[in-house]
Image (tube, grey):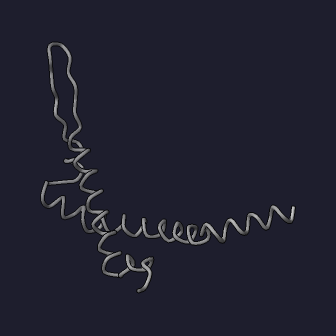
């Protein structure tokens, strides 16, 4: 049993599991912050441009061929793409301006 425990501890040290756990915890907290930033600042800007976020999400394109029709929810996709792009931009700006992208690089 002691040998297995030592093997587990070696695995945690060698694979950086503690750093991964810390990164995950910080990432979860940052996710909430970024979501609030996007909801509080980016979505209102989008609403000013396109009218309303809800109106954009409800936008569909209906195609009818013969007696069959299909609704394409292009507005929901576009709204989701805008949120994804703005979230990625906010994360990039935070990482870039806080110089967090240079933490893992080895010093020369």
Residue that appears at 14% across and 17% down = 65
Q: Looking at this view, is 13 or 53 the one in front?
A: 13
Q: Is residue 46 above or below residue 57?
A: below
Instruction: Please tell me in which quadrant of the rendered image residue 89 appears.
Output: bottom left
Residue that appears at 18% across and 58% down = 47
Residue that appears at 21% across and 44% down = 75
* Image location (x, y in percent) of residue 106: 44, 81
Q: Quadrant of the N terminus?
A: bottom right
Q: Is 77 situated left or right of 9 in this image?
A: left
Q: Quadrant of the C terminus?
A: bottom left
Query: Hey, which residue is sitting farthest front in the picture?
Result: 108
* Image location (x, y in percent) of residue 25: 54, 68
Query: Hey, which residue is sitting farthest right in the picture?
Result: 1
Q: Is residue 54 above or below residue 19?
A: above
Q: Is 28 situated left or right of 79 in this image?
A: right
* Image location (x, y in percent) of residue 81: 26, 52
Q: Is residue 39 above or below residue 58?
A: below
Query: Hey, which residue is sitting farthest bottom in the picture?
Result: 108
* Image location (x, y in percent) of residue 69: 20, 21
Q: Is residue 86 above or below residue 69?
A: below
Residue that appears at 18% across and 64% down = 45
Instruction: Please tell me in which quadrant of the rendered image residue 36 appears.
Output: bottom left
């Amino acid at each position: 049993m002691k040998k297995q425990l030592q093997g587990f501890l070696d695995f945690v040290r060698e694979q950086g599991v503690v750093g991964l756990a810390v990164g995950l915890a910080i990432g979860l907290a940052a996710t909430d912050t970024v979501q609030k930033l996007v909801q509080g600042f980016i979505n209102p800007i989008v609403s000013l441009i396109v009218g309303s976020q809800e109106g954009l999400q409800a936008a569909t394109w209906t195609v009818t061929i013969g007696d069959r029709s299909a609704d394409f929810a292009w507005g929901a996709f576009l709204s989701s793409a805008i949120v994804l792009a703005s979230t990625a931009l906010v994360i990039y700006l935070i990482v870039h301006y806080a110089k967090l992208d240079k933490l893992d690089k080895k010093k020369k």
